[in-house]
Amino acid sequence: MLSQIPVDFSKINKEALDQEILRIGMIAELDAINLYEQLAALTSNKDIKKVFLDIAKEEKTHVAEFQTMLLRLDAEQVAEMAHGKKEVKELTGK
């Protein structure tokens, strides 16, 4: 099932609420990055392109901030990220 925002917070386990909030923030920022990069690709105006790409870059920082906080709260996420990194290395040799 795809995520639905806004979320019905009454259905979320209270212990997982902060993690869910951080993931929602990450989803919003990733959507913004995709939008801004797509708009930058559409325009032929170099100044508009530059501004959109700069804003997209700032959103990437926001994703990293939310992810940093999430990793403080979710040990399983930390372990799965390490597992995913290992799998990619095995598949690609890099």
Image: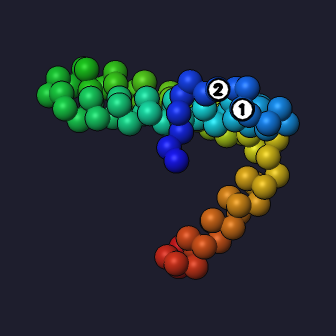
Q: Which mark is residue 11?
A: 1
Answer left or right for 7 relative to 72.
Answer: left
- Is 3 above or below relative to 1? above
Q: CA distance from mark 2 to mark 1?
A: 6 Å
Residue type marked 2: Asp
Q: Image quarter for residue 27? A: top right
Disc 2 and disc 1 in contact, CB within 8 angstroms = yes
Q: Amino acid at mark 1?
A: Lys
SS assignment at label 1? helix
Q: Residue furthest front?
A: 11
How busy is the neighbourhood of tag 2: few (under 14 within 10 Å), some, or many (20 plus)?
A: few
From the viewer's side, name the closer residue of 46 and 22.
Answer: 22
Give the x, y percent position of residue 66. Answer: 66, 33
Return the x and y of residue 3 as percentages of the image width and height.
53, 39
Q: Is residue 73 left or right of residue 28?
A: right
Residue at (61%, 27%) from the top-left corner? 7
> Looking at the picture, does residue 78 appear above or below residue 38?
below
